[in-house]
Image (tube, grey):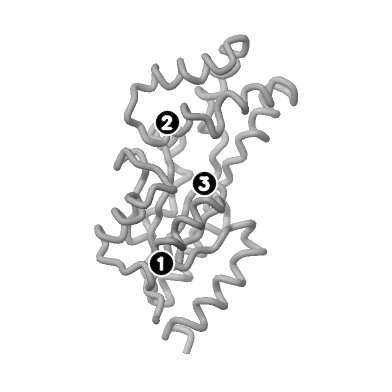
């Protein structure tokens, strides 16, 4: 089966989004740990990506997790745009895949406030064929429906797609639906394996 499309996660793949490192720069290690535990990976963060609740309600959920750090949580979320930086390889990688005749898409758990705060971090999107943000659909990875939404919208077959994500849970969900999923560790570690996989399964490397 030929591969026709590559689907990228965004955070920690095409952009640097090291939330804990960012918090350490703001507050120091002890406070950063408390703010991290109150935000990242919590139900409130899931709701942030899903964007089905008012932002004020999500902030209340964050601060309820650690009331003594309410001021720091508020500051961190206000400055969240500083955390998102596009990797230098992002646009060239997308362009390389497009030059090989492949379609390129994104599928990302991402919240609109971050887009508003740092739109330039997503500059690679203009080189892509489309994609799906969790906040637009009110569903998040690893829910199967968000994968199906992208596949249906762009007329893709799962078995003809490569999916790249830094989360093993999301990789497992994609594999279960028939996509060829790779867990992203770093550009240097992961890209060679993907390039070889594509070389074996596309006509563009013949």
Q: Residue furthest right?
A: 29
Q: Residue furthest top?
A: 68
At numbered mark 1, what does the secondary structure look like: helix, strand or loop? loop
Question: Can you give x and y, in whole percent of width and height, for residue 130 in the image?
Answer: 32, 57
| Mark 1 lies on residue | 178
Question: Can you give x and y, in whole percent of width and height, for residue 20 in the image?
Answer: 65, 33
- Residue 48's mark? 2
Q: Residue furthest bottom?
A: 206
Judged by depth in the image, the label closer to the viewer, 3 or 2, is: 2
Q: Residues within 10 Å of mark 2 (few under 14, many from 20)?
A: many
At numbered mark 2, what does the secondary structure look like: helix, strand or loop? helix
Q: Quadrant of the N terminus?
A: bottom left
Q: Residues within 10 Å of mark 3 (few under 14, many from 20)?
A: some
Mark sitting earlier along the chain (1/3): 3
Mark sitting earlier along the chain (2/1): 2
| Mark 3 lies on residue | 11
For the point 66% across and 22% down, the residue is 34
At numbered mark 3, what does the secondary structure look like: helix, strand or loop? loop
For the point 37% across and 52% down, the residue is 144
For the point 66% across and 64% down, the residue is 189
């Amino acid at each position: 089966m030929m591969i026709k499309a590559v689907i990228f996660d965004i955070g920690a793949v095409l952009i640097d989004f090291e939330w804990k490192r960012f918090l350490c720069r703001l507050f120091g290690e002890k406070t950063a740990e408390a703010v991290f535990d109150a935000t990242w990976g919590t139900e409130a963060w899931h709701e942030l990506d899903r964007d089905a609740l008012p932002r004020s309600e999500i902030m209340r959920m964050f601060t309820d997790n650690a009331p003594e750090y309410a001021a720091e949580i508020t500051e961190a979320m206000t400055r969240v745009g500083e955390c998102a930086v596009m990797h230098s390889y992002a646009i060239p990688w997308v362009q390389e895949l497009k030059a090989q005749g492949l379609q390129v898409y994104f599928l990302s758990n991402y919240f609109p406030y971050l887009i508003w705060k740092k739109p330039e971090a997503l500059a690679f999107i203009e080189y892509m064929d489309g994609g799906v943000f969790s906040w637009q659909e009110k569903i998040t990875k690893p829910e199967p429906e968000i994968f199906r939404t992208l596949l249906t919208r762009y007329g893709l077959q799962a078995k003809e797609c490569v999916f790249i994500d830094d989360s093993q849970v999301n990789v497992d969900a994609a594999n279960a639906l028939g996509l060829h999923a790779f867990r992203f560790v770093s550009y240097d570690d992961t890209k060679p394996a993907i390039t070889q996989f594509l070389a074996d399964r596309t006509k563009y490397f013949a």
